[in-house]
Structure formats: structure tokens, C-alpha cells
């Protein structure tokens, strides 16, 4: 293992690999440390069309992804409706995304060290990173090591996450819908279950804020969902737990994402969307911001990064936190989903909310315009799940 680098990036997920690619392309000497990459990191793997606009080279990955154009929104009963998305969500395996990103970082000139960082200490010239197979000295440090970031811990920046806990597994594609993504909501639970079809399997999981529901409850909800479509008992199923890096919007949070000779990007900085749990786009964006301002030998770059991160993310993350508190599993949210099956106005409201999330556009004016457009256009799509429930109710009625 080499002993010295201008910049050490810990973690080669979307944030770290992107930062490594962009900075190595600028001629920076980058060591990218990650023992697992590329790997199937627990994730839905949903990438919005907006991300493809922002990172056009990602189009190379589209042959490995599944574009999904319809979302089914439902309650635990299976009652719900479908919404045609304004633009497709592309769903990928994280291993495919990771391999593609790592290859690009290496081609740009970064070096990948497949090691786990165990401890970090400041030195006169920057940092010393102790890993499972030796140490590395670096002038600057970037923590791209996810929600449980060791860099965040050792730099003592004081950023406290409110992470979301998830359970996820990857059943066979033939056990569920292949061209529709499913979002299922539960009364009183501030989270949701998702079923995302990928090219040759699905990602099915559920997320809730940590400490809100026990693992057994989440597993029971997933078992019931998977039982609904008959795929229970497939031999290749292994369910994993993982956390998503979201952080409360306290004053000072963004200043905390960087300090003398270090910065945090992606989930390590708590940048995942608190409403959807989606963090890949913000991982790319934060890496892009960092690559713009990083300047070896100039100690101001961490502060410039923190300032631009605040400008870029503060509003969106605040709106997303509000949406989560107002809609996810609340009385208002559940009532909306219930009514959207029968009311054009409620249907258009939920569809416009999905549009805002998929387009990453939280502006009120744009939301109202899309709501009205959806309402005028009509075209409410009932879900087969809802029809199933109606049939069951009718049968029960007959029996009575
Ligand atoms: C179940 C689940 C479903 C999700 N679904 C979606 C979705 O559909 N769409 C979406 O946009 N987002 C989703 N997210 C969020 C998304 O996974 C994250 O926001 C995204 O992966 C963050 O990227 P990152 O590069 O910051 O961190 P990560 O992807 O977590 O990468 C961190 C890397 O750091 C490495 N690392 C950690 N510790 C060390 C160490 N000590 N030494 C060296 N390396 C280390 C890890 O091996 C890992 O490769 C989901 C998250 C979960 C948990």
C-alpha cells in the first residue's frame, strides 16, 4: 500500500467515486479507500431522470437499468391507485452503478485502495489514516463513507444524524410487478415500503426513522407484502438492515460538514432526502460541489464548500422534512391516499407530489401548476390492488 496522497477519500460509493473521478481529472493525486467497492450496497437503486440530466454520462448505465414509468401508491390493504410518472425512474443494481463509477475514477487517475479505515488522526501536514493493512498520510481528507461515517466521528465535527432504518431484500423479478414501482404506506408509520423492479431482480424494502418501529414489525410488513404476490419462500432471499443518512436542519449543520482540511459528502454529511430516503443524487451533487472548490494548499476550500452546500441543499432538505412530517403515514397522508382512489382532486395532488419528488422540484408555484395540469387532464388509474380489495369486499358482502 502506498504511504502518501494529496487527498484521501474514504468510501467509494456514489459520493466518493464521483469526487475521486472529478478531482483526479483535475490532476489531484487521489487515494480512494474502500474495502468493498464495487458492491451491492443495500438500496432501492432508484435514479431520477433529473440526475441523468445533471450527469449526462450516466446514460451509459441505462442498458443495465430498468426504466419505470408508473408508480403504484397503496395502503396496507392493497387499496390504492397508479400514477403515470412525468419522467421515468431508472432502477439499477448498486453493484453495476459502483463498478461503472469506480472504473471512471480509475481511468481519470485515482488509485483505489481496497482497505478499511480503522482510525484517523491529525498530523502536522494533514491526516494519518490507519487501515487494516497499514497507514496512509494525506494532505486533505474527504469522508464519503456513508451514514455511519468514521470520518465524521474522528473529525469530531458534531453533525448528528437522524438516520432512517431500513430492511431490504432482492426477490426474483417474476414474483412481482416488472414495470411498476410500488410505494405502500401504513397508518401511523412515518415511513413506507417500496418494491422497485430492476433489470433482473427487485429491491423490496421498508424504511422508518430509527427507533420508530421494531425490526420484527418491519419484517412482518414485508412478509405480508411479499406474501401478497406469492414470492415468499424463494431460496435466494436474504434480508439486510441498513441506514440512510439524513440529518436535522439545525443552524450550523452545513458549517459542520467541513473543517480544517476535511469535508463530508453524501450520506456521511446527512444529505439523503428526509422524505424519500433518496440520497444518490445528493451524493453526486455534493461530490460535484466539492470538486469545484477543492484547492490543495489553500485552507479556505472547506469553508467555501460548506457555504455552497448550504445554498444548494438547505431549502430542499427543509421542504422534504416538512413533507415527511406532514404526509408520511400521518392522518393527512393516509386520508389523501384513501381519497385519491376516488377523487380526481386528491389523485392530482398525490400525483403532483410524486412529480415534485421525481423532478426534485419543491417550488410551491410549480407544484400548484402541476396539480392543476394533472387535475384538468384527469386520467386517474385505479390499481389492480384496489380492484382486488373491491372484489374481496363484494364477496364478503355476498357471503353476508
Ligand atoms: C435500503 C436503502 C434504500 C435506498 N434506496 C435509495 C434509492 O432508491 N434511491 C436513492 O437515490 N437513494 C436510496 N438510498 C440512499 C442511498 O443508498 C444513499 O444515499 C447513497 O448510497 C449515499 O451514497 P454515499 O456515497 O454517500 O454513501 P454509500 O453509498 O453508503 O457509500 C459509502 C462507502 O463507504 C465505504 N466505507 C464505509 N466505511 C468505510 C471505512 N471505514 N473505510 C473505507 N470505506 C468505508 C462503504 O464500503 C461504502 O462503499 C437508499 C438507502 C438504503 C439504505
Image (tube, rainbow, N blue to C red):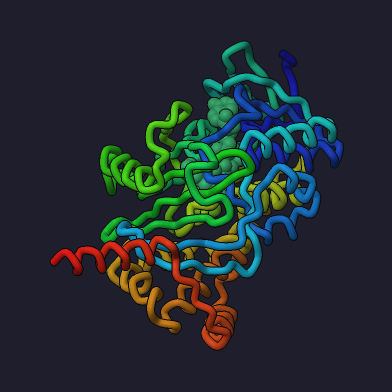
Question: Which residue corresponds to the image point at 60% horizontal and 70% vertical from the top-left?
Answer: 361
Q: Nearer the viewer, residue 358 or 244?
A: 358
Question: In x, y percent, where is residue 350?
Answer: 46, 73
- In depth, the one of 232 and 146 nearer the eye is 232
Would you identify the image quadrant in which residue 67 lies? Answer: bottom right
Towards the viewer: 256 or 374: 374
Give the number of marks.
0
Image quarter where ligand 1 lies: top right
| Viewer-nearest residue: 234 or 37 | 234
- Residue at x 29% of width, y 42% of height: 220
Q: Is residue 78 visible?
A: yes
Residue 42: x percent and y percent?
51, 37
* Quadrant in which residue 191 is drawn: bottom left
| 99 lies above or below 368 | above
Name the residue located 39 percent from the left edge and 57 percent from the top edge: 184
Question: Is 146 displayed left or right of 86 in the figure?
Answer: left
Residue 380 % position (x, y): 49, 77
- For the N terminus, the quadrant is top right
Amino acid at each position: 500500500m502506498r504511504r502518501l496522497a494529496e487527498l484521501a477519500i474514504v468510501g467509494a460509493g456514489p459520493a466518493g467515486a464521483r469526487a475521486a473521478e472529478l478531482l483526479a481529472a483535475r490532476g489531484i493525486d487521489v487515494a480512494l479507500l474502500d474495502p468493498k467497492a464495487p458492491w451491492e450496497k443495500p438500496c432501492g437503486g432508484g435514479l431520477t431522470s433529473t440526475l441523468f440530466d445533471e450527469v449526462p454520462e450516466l446514460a451509459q448505465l441505462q442498458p443495465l437499468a430498468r426504466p419505470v414509468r408508473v408508480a403504484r401508491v397503496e395502503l396496507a390493504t392493497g387499496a390504492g391507485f397508479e400514477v403515470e410518472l412525468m419522467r421515468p425512474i431508472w432502477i439499477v443494481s448498486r453493484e453495476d452503478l459502483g463498478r461503472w463509477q469506480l472504473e471512471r475514477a480509475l481511468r481519470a487517475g485515482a488509485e483505489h485502495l481496497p482497505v478499511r479505515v480503522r482510525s484517523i488522526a491529525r498530523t502536522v501536514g494533514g491526516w494519518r489514516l490507519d487501515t487494516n493493512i497499514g497507514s496512509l498520510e494525506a494532505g486533505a481528507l474527504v469522508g464519503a463513507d456513508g451514514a455511519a461515517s468514521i470520518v465524521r466521528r474522528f473529525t469530531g465535527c458534531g453533525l448528528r444524524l437522524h438516520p432512517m432504518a431500513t430492511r431490504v431484500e432482492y426477490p426474483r423479478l417474476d414474483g412481482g410487478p416488472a414495470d411498476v414501482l410500488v410505494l405502500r404506506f401504513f397508518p401511523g408509520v412515518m415511513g413506507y415500503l417500496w418494491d422497485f423492479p430492476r433489470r433482473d431482480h427487485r429491491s423490496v424494502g421498508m424504511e422508518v426513522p430509527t427507533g420508530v418501529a421494531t425490526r420484527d414489525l418491519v419484517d412482518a410488513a414485508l412478509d405480508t407484502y411479499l406474501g401478497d404476490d406469492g414470492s415468499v419462500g424463494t431460496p435466494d432471499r436474504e434480508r439486510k438492515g441498513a441506514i440512510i443518512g439524513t440529518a436535522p436542519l439545525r443552524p450550523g449543520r452545513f458549517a459542520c460538514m467541513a473543517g480544517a482540511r476535511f469535508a463530508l459528502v453524501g450520506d456521511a454529511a446527512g444529505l439523503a432526502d428526509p422524505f424519500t430516503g433518496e440520497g444518490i443524487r445528493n451524493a453526486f451533487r455534493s461530490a460535484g460541489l466539492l470538486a469545484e472548490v477543492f484547492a490543495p494548499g489553500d485552507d479556505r476550500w472547506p469553508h467555501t464548500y460548506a457555504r455552497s452546500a448550504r445554498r444548494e441543499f438547505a431549502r430542499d432538505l427543509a421542504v422534504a422534512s416538512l413533507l415527511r412530517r406532514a404526509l408520511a403515514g400521518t392522518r393527512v397522508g393516509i386520508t389523501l391516499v384513501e381519497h385519491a382512489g376516488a377523487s380526481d382532486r386528491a389523485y392530482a395532488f398525490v400525483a403532483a407530489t410524486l412529480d415534485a419528488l421525481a423532478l426534485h422540484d419543491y417550488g410551491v408555484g410549480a407544484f400548484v401548476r402541476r396539480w392543476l395540469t394533472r387535475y384538468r387532464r384527469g386520467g386517474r388509474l385505479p390499481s389492480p390492488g384496489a380492484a382486488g380489495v373491491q372484489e374481496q369486499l363484494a364477496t364478503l358482502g355476498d357471503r353476508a
